[in-house]
C-alpha cells in the first residue's frame, strides 16, 4: 500500500532511486517529485541516525507516523522516507568519519532541496534538538526563511 504522503511518487521515481549511485542522481529524483507536489510543500525534520529514540528503526517509525499524520491532514508533504535506504548506502561511499559522511549527505542532497524554495515549511518532531541533522535543518530553515513548526511530544497519538 502506498502511503498518502507518497502519492506523487511513480514507479519510475522508485526505480531511479534504486539505480542512483550519487547524491546528484538522487537529488534529480527528489526535485522531479517536489515539482509534482502541490504547493505549499512541507517537510518533516527530526532524529534519524542520531538522537531521538536512540535507534534508527525507532526514529524511522516515528518519522513515518508523523509524515503520514500530517499528510492525512491535507498537508502537501515531501516524504523523504523512500530516500533513506539509498541515502544510507551513499553515505557509506563518501567521506571517512561518520560526521563527514553526514555533512556530505546534508550538503549534497538536502541543502539544494531547501535552497530551491520548493519547501516552504518544516515540521520538527519533538526531540529534534538531539539530532545533528535536525539542528542543521533548523539553521537552514532560519537562513532561508522557511516556516518552522514544532510538533508536540504526543503529536502522533492525538
Image (cartoon, rainbow, N blue to C red):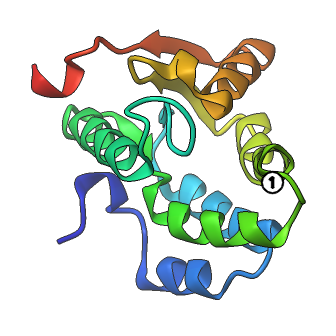
Vertical order, 131 against 26 (above or below): above
Image-based side of 103 in relation to 145, left or right = right
Image-based side of 69 in relation to 32, left or right = left
Vertical order, 34 against 8 (above or below): above
How far across and down, in percent of the image, does residue 12 sit?
A: 51, 85
Image-based side of 76 in relation to 140, left or right = left
SS category of the residue bearing label 1 = helix
How far across and down, in percent of the image, does residue 67 sit?
A: 33, 40
Residue holding disc 1: 101
Res 53 → quadrant: top left
User: In the image, what residue occupies the spot 27% across and 14% down?
Assistant: 153
The answer, for residue 152, to whether it is visible in the render is yes
User: In the image, what residue occupies the spot 57% across and 84% down?
Assistant: 18
How far across and down, in percent of the image, does residue 57 sit?
A: 36, 53
Compare residues 98 and 44 and report the one nearer the observer. Answer: 98
Compare residues 144 and 136 and report the one nearer the observer. Answer: 136
Compare residues 86 and 17 and report the one nearer the observer. Answer: 86
Res 63 → quadrant: top left
Amino acid at each position: 500500500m502506498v502511503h498518502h504522503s507518497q502519492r506523487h511518487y511513480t514507479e519510475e521515481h522508485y526505480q531511479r532511486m534504486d539505480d542512483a549511485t550519487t547524491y546528484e542522481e538522487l537529488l534529480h529524483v527528489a526535485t522531479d517529485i517536489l515539482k509534482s507536489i502541490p504547493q505549499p510543500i512541507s517537510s518533516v525534520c527530526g532524529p534519524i541516525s542520531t538522537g531521538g529514540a536512540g535507534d534508527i528503526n525507532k526514529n524511522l517509525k516515528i518519522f513515518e507516523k508523523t509524515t503520514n499524520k500530517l499528510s492525512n491532514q491535507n498537508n502537501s508533504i515531501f516524504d523523504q522516507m523512500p530516500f533513506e535506504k539509498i541515502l544510507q548506502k551513499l553515505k557509506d561511499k563518501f567521506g571517512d568519519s561518520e560526521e563527514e559522511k553526514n555533512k556530505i549527505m546534508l550538503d549534497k542532497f538536502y541543502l539544494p532541496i531547501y535552497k530551491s524554495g520548493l519547501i516552504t515549511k518544516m515540521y520538527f518532531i519533538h526531540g529534534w534538538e538531539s539530532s545533528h541533522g535536525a539542528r542543521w535543518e533548523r539553521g537552514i530553515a532560519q537562513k532561508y526563511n522557511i516556516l518552522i513548526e514544532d510538533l508536540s511530544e504526543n503529536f502522533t497519538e492525538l
